[in-house]
Image (cartoon, rainbow, N blue to C red):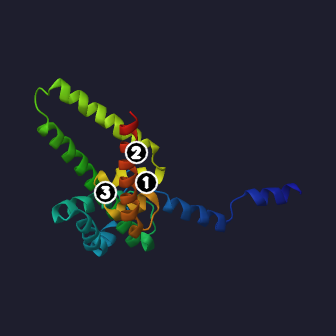
Amino acid sequence: MDLGSAATAVLPTPERRAERDDRKERQPVPGAVRDDLEEVFRRDYRRVVGVAARVLGSRDAAEDVAQEVFLSFGRSTVPAGEATGWLSVAAAHTALNVLRSGRRRTSREEATAASPVAPDAAEEALALEERARVRAALARLPRKQAMALVLRHSGLSYAEVAAALDLSPGSVGTTVRRAESALREELNRHASSG
């Protein structure tokens, strides 16, 4: 290769400059908002709120989710042609996260409100012993059954359990019932041998 052809290969051609300029335009600028955000917002807002409302059962909470989703979209590099699908999935995920965090908060609040100020020491010891027995029995179950049982009794729907464990939604009920039966057998087996 001579010096002339090497220089030609390195020097930017108009096509290379145009390609580089196109890549620069697609790169997000930190803190910048997409140019197409308003158009996408007007087109897809109702759909995003609808998806979130179906999960949450509350239009007010769904509008909060929509705001969060559009803020994320505004900072994203998702192509405009893929925006509708991306926004729908993001709305579902965000709404499920809100639902889960609400369940955890409600559970903690109920546990705090329901617990007596000064629990009886004997009752507390029995409760701890019983929880330890259940955990030990749960650990002896097949993993998929144990996970299905824990997730379902943690408040997840059959569809959520199915998605989390890669099961068909129709098989979740059967898996949970078998897990409950296996757990009872484990508890009885160890109660009679203990």
Query: Is residue 19 placed above or below 134 in the rendered structure?
Result: below
Q: Amino acid at mark 3?
A: Leu
Q: Which tag is nearer the camera, tag 3 or tag 2? A: 2
What residue is shown with label 1?
145
Closer to the N terminus: mark 1 or mark 3?
1
**In the picture, residue 167 is in which quadrant?**
bottom left
What residue is shown with label 3?
156
Q: In x, y percent, where is residue 51? A: 28, 69
- The residue shown at (17%, 64%) is 58
Q: Secondary structure at mark 2?
A: helix
What residue is shown with label 2?
186
Q: In x, y percent, where is residue 109? A: 16, 42
Q: Secondary structure at mark 1?
A: helix
Closer to the N terminus: mark 3 or mark 2?
3
**In the picture, residue 179 is in which quadrant?**
bottom left
Q: Amino acid at mark 2?
A: Glu
**In the picture, residue 119 is in which quadrant?**
top left
